[in-house]
Image (cartoon, grey):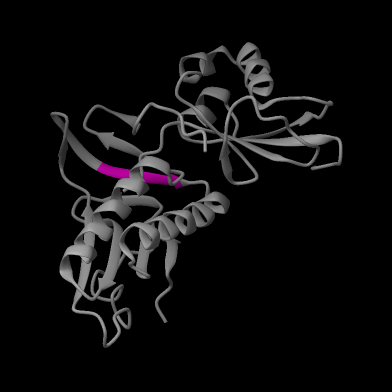
Amino acid sequence: MTEKFSITADPLDANAIAEGLSTSEDGAVVVFSGIVRAHNKGRKVLHLEYEAYEAMVFPVLERVAKDVSRRFGVERLRIHHRIGRVDIGESSVLVAAASPHRGTAFEAARHTMNEIKRIVPIWKREFFEGGDVWVEGPKEPVTA
Amino acid sequence: MTGSGAVTVLLFAAAREAAGRGRLEVPHREGLTAAEVWKDLESERPALAPLAGSVSVAVNHRFVPRDTVLAAGDELAFLPPVSGG
């Protein structure tokens, strides 16, 4: 049984996340895989390391799923995120969304990723040739 | 330990490194706010100062405004801008 949400140090499987997600009413399953690329801002990236506030990640993911349900009517959504070291080419995040129509499945997956980058308490540290740095998302504090 | 008279403070990522630790306890007092806890931390650990404008505050795993009044036993977290995905 594939979990709805997971935070794991193990490799993510883009094929497995959608298993059993769609129903006979669905016409579309979108799976998004975010992978670690070798260059960022002119730097040669060696690998990334992710840190999570795990006790808060799950309530925030529930909030994201509720928002996706309200906006798009998409109820079948899964989100899996890596923590710890992730190498170039590996998947750091997977989102799967199933819906009767492709438009809402695409939009639900896109919105989910935007919300992950905005409010889910996970941070990445980029290790590049010559140093390392915490990557920071939107600087505007979240207050609600 | 989390006694009835304390607030647990968690710091993550750049804030954890700037503070030199990820977890501490501060004594609770009536009317204590998250912003006051941050100010105290910042005065002890000036490396936190550059983060002041961008940290989000969470109490018991929910985002809250900085002027939120804390209760004894609360888990207060200071979160630098997130960068998952």
Residue at image position (60%, 26%) is B66
Q: Nearer the viewer, residue A76 or B51?
A: A76
Position of B55 with respect to B30 (left or right) is: left
Q: Nearer the viewer, residue A58 or A36?
A: A58
Position of A34 with respect to B52 (left or right) is: left
Residue at image position (27%, 72%) is A98
| Position in image of residue A74 (x %, y %) | 33, 67
Q: Quadrant of residue B43?
A: top right
Picture layout, residue A41 above or below residue A118: above
Report the magenta stretch's main SS.
Answer: strand
Q: Which residues are magenta?
A: A47-51
Tell me if residue A135 is in the magenta stretch: no
| Position in image of residue A137 (x %, y %) | 34, 34
The answer to whether one can see residue A135 in this image is: no
The answer to whether one can see residue A113 in this image is: yes
Position of A7 with respect to A11 (left or right) is: right
Residue projecting furthest to the right: B4
Q: Nearer the viewer, residue B76 or A101?
A: A101
Residue at image position (73%, 40%) is B74
| Position in image of residue A135 (x %, y %) | 33, 33
